[in-house]
Image (cartoon, grey):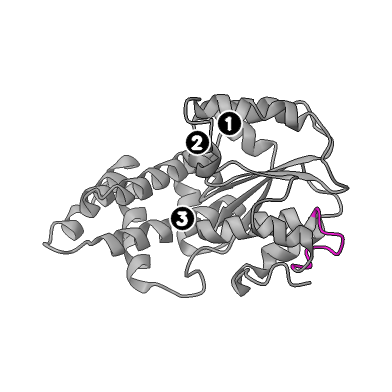
Amino acid sequence: MDGGSHIPARQEHVRRRLDALAAHPPQSLVLEGGGADERETLALYWAKLLNCPDGACGTCETCRQIDERVFRDLILVDGAFFESEGATHKSHVERVRELRPTWGQPPHGEGRRVTIFPEFQDRNPEIANTLLKTLEEPRPGNVFVLTAPQRERLLPTLVSRSFILTLAWPDDSREDAEAAQWADALYGVWETGRGWFGRTMAKGAVDRDLARRVILEVMRGLRRALTGESASGADRLARRFDASGLRRLGLALGEAQDALEAQANPTLVLDWLATRFTT
């Protein structure tokens, strides 16, 4: 089986879980963590598993068509879907609602119809509500995959109806002592309300790369806290926040990431994050 040959070795644990799930696939799957390309690669691997006669062989006509995004039982709801010919005059919500009759029909082949929503955190909330209504009325032969950096950036009721798989975070195998030190300072200011601005006031103390790494480090701590893993940062987050607080933190981290991508001042982004949860 080499249909997952493009899956990085550090995501092998997710591939193995998908292999195990294929016998009884959940109607909705959320792939979080990792990078956007890795999430999409694993989503396409899932489509191969559910349709390839040889279990994602990677070489048959089905696997090749899935790789080329032309397989008839694969629906990829991405930018190209919304910009396709004849769709530009319709809203994104209208385009997704047009899929409901298709989801009400069995797949064309002997496998499953797989609908992938890449980076679903960027979609209109009304699209999430449309999908939620679909999941409330099970559609035999149809499965859905949502990808997002963190589950907290998705509609909670949608997450609760999905099976969650968490990819290894970028650079998760490498320790980043500098980012860990800054993350630890964030935990401290959230606990005491003091001692933050002395770090960011120095000229050039924070650049965009450092801000991204700090946010990623806190995300790692958040994921460990949510899954009950023991680690110093995770333990401090678990003591500081209850379950709803951890969800709010996840949303704030996503907003901070988006702000950096929009070229916001990295110092101001970290300052906002530091003061967002002070007592």
**Disc 1 vs disc 3: which is toward the camera?**
1
**Pointer 1 residue:** 128
**For the residue marked with disc 3, what is the amino acid?**
Met
Hey, which residue is sitting farthest left in the picture? 203
Q: Is residue 154 found inside the magenta-colored segment of the image?
A: no
The quadrant the N terminus occupies is bottom right
Residue 212 visible: yes
The kind of secondary structure element at disc 2 is: loop
267 relative to 261 in the view: left or right: left
Residue 195 visible: no
**Pointer 3 residue:** 219
- Displayed quadrant of residue 11: bottom right
Q: Residue at x 30, y 59 (%)?
A: 211
State how far apart marks 1 and 2 are (Cα).
Answer: 8 Å
Decide which of 103, 188 is in the foreground and name it. Answer: 103
Residue 243 drawn above or below residue 134: below
**For the residue marked with disc 2, what is the amino acid?**
Arg
Image position, residue 223 (x, y; %): 54, 54
Q: Main secondary structure of the magenta part?
A: loop
Decide which of 4, 267 is in the foreground and name it. Answer: 4
- Displayed quadrant of residue 33: bottom right
**Pointer 2 residue:** 123
195 relative to 191 in the view: left or right: left
State how far apart marks 1 and 3 are (Cα).
Answer: 23 Å
Give the mark nearer the N terminus: 1 vs 2. Answer: 2
173 relative to 267 in the view: left or right: right
State how far apart marks 3 and 2 are (Cα).
Answer: 21 Å
C-beta proximity under 8 Å, tags 3 and 2: no
Q: Residue at x 30, y 51 (%)?
A: 260
C-beta proximity under 8 Å, tags 1 and 2: yes
